[in-house]
Each structure stands twice: as structure tokens, then as C-alpha cells.
Amino acid sequence: MGNNTSAQMNIDIDLITACIKRERKAEYELYKLTYRYLMSICVRYTRSYEEAQDSLNTGFMKILTNLDKYKAGVPFKAWIRKIMVNVLIDEYRREKKHLENIQHVENFAELPNMAELNNAIVSMDVEQIHKYIMALPPVSQKVFNLYVVDGYDHKEIANMLNISEGTSKWHLHNSREQLKGMLTKVN
């Protein structure tokens, strides 16, 4: 994750202070400024737009209630991203309905031969990639997003999803194999 200045979020400290004081106009302004970014995170972890919108609203409320803990030296975008991902993982844990999809495969080593998949993904647009990721089984989709998109390691993912590191590695491998299969059908 490089320091991409065009993707930086210009959130004024005065706006944050006003939100901490519960000024509705400031809260609405912060919501408008962060909406697209937070929604881009939510759609990767949910199955529908409505579910993503509900998660975004839950996450935004958590951001508002924790603004007094925000430290000005930390990039605001990274801070809200972490809160949003944690909210999404908490919601996922509460659902538990997808846990039957978990296959416990221990000590599965990640295979290094993913160059073809990575090259195919580079040539696609974001909408196509998102569509393929959304077609993955729920647990594999979450592991793929957490590992590839959000940069968590297998130990962190295992703790978040209450699975073993081996199972996390298996889901990453499984999602990559499925994506590779989807991409070879297209190309």
C-alpha cells in the first residue's frame, strides 16, 4: 500500500472536533466525505448492496463514537479503514451461517505459481475483478479480501474469522485456484 496522494482523504481536524462535539452538520459532512471510500470496502465483504449499506452505516456510527480516540498523526483513511474492516468481520462472526463452508485443511502451503493469475488480474478492470471475487464461497472470499486486498497475514485472518492458519492458507489457495479457473474461461 503506497502513499498515493490522489487517494488521500482531506479531513480537516476542525471537522473531526465538531463531530466529537456531536454537531449534526459536521457528522453529515464527514459521512459525505467518507461514503465512497467506506462503501468500496463494504461491497468487498458483503453479498448485496443493501447489506453493504447496512454495514457502512454500522461502521460509520462506530467511527463517530470513537473519533475522540483518533490520533492526528495517523492517516485518517487508514484509521477508518481499520474500523470498517473490524466491523465487517464482527458482523460476519455474528452471522456464523457461513461457517459450514469452512473446510479444515491444516498445514497447507501457499503455492508460488500464481504469476499467470496475477498477470490476468492486472489486465482486467476493477468491476470484473470484483464480480469474480463475489462469486467465491463466502469464507474464501473473506480470506482473499483480507489477505490480498487489505494486507492481513494468515495469523491475523485466523484470529478474525476463528479458523486456523492452515485453513486460512487453504482458503487463499482455493480462492486463487477458483479465480484462475474463472479467468481462463474468459481469456
Image (cartoon, grey):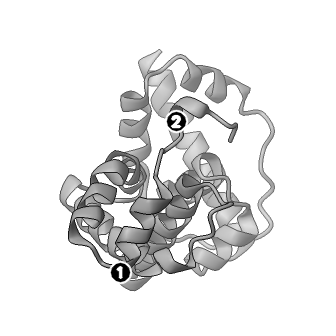
Is label 2 in a helix, a strand or a loop?
Answer: helix
Q: Relative to 179, is 42 above or below?
A: below
Q: Nearer the viewer, residue 87 or 78?
A: 78
Q: CA distance from mark 1 to mark 2?
A: 32 Å
Mark 1 vs 2: CB contact within 8 A: no
At label 1, the amino acid type is: Glu
**Where residue 66 sits: x, y (%)?**
47, 79
Q: Is residue 81 left or right of residue 23?
A: right
Place residue 180 in its image quadrant: top right
Tell me if I can see residue 98 in this picture. no
Residue 25 shows which numbered tag?
none
Residue tagged 1: 95
Query: Mark 1, residues whose alpha carbon is within 10 Å: few (<14), some, or many (≥20)?
Result: few
Residue tagged 2: 7
Q: Relative to 179, is 60 above or below?
A: below
Place residue 36 in its image quadrant: top left
Query: Quadrant where the N terminus lies?
Result: top right
Q: Is residue 168 left or right of residue 6?
A: right
**Where residue 140 sits: x, y (%)?**
52, 57
Is label 1 in a helix, a strand or a loop?
Answer: helix
- Residue at the image point whose x is 36% and y is 71% from the top: 19
- Residue at the image point whose x is 44% and y is 65% from the top: 16
Q: Nearer the viewer, residue 168 or 80?
A: 80
**Where residue 173 sits: x, y (%)?**
66, 50
Mark 1 / mark 2, whichever is N-terminal = 2
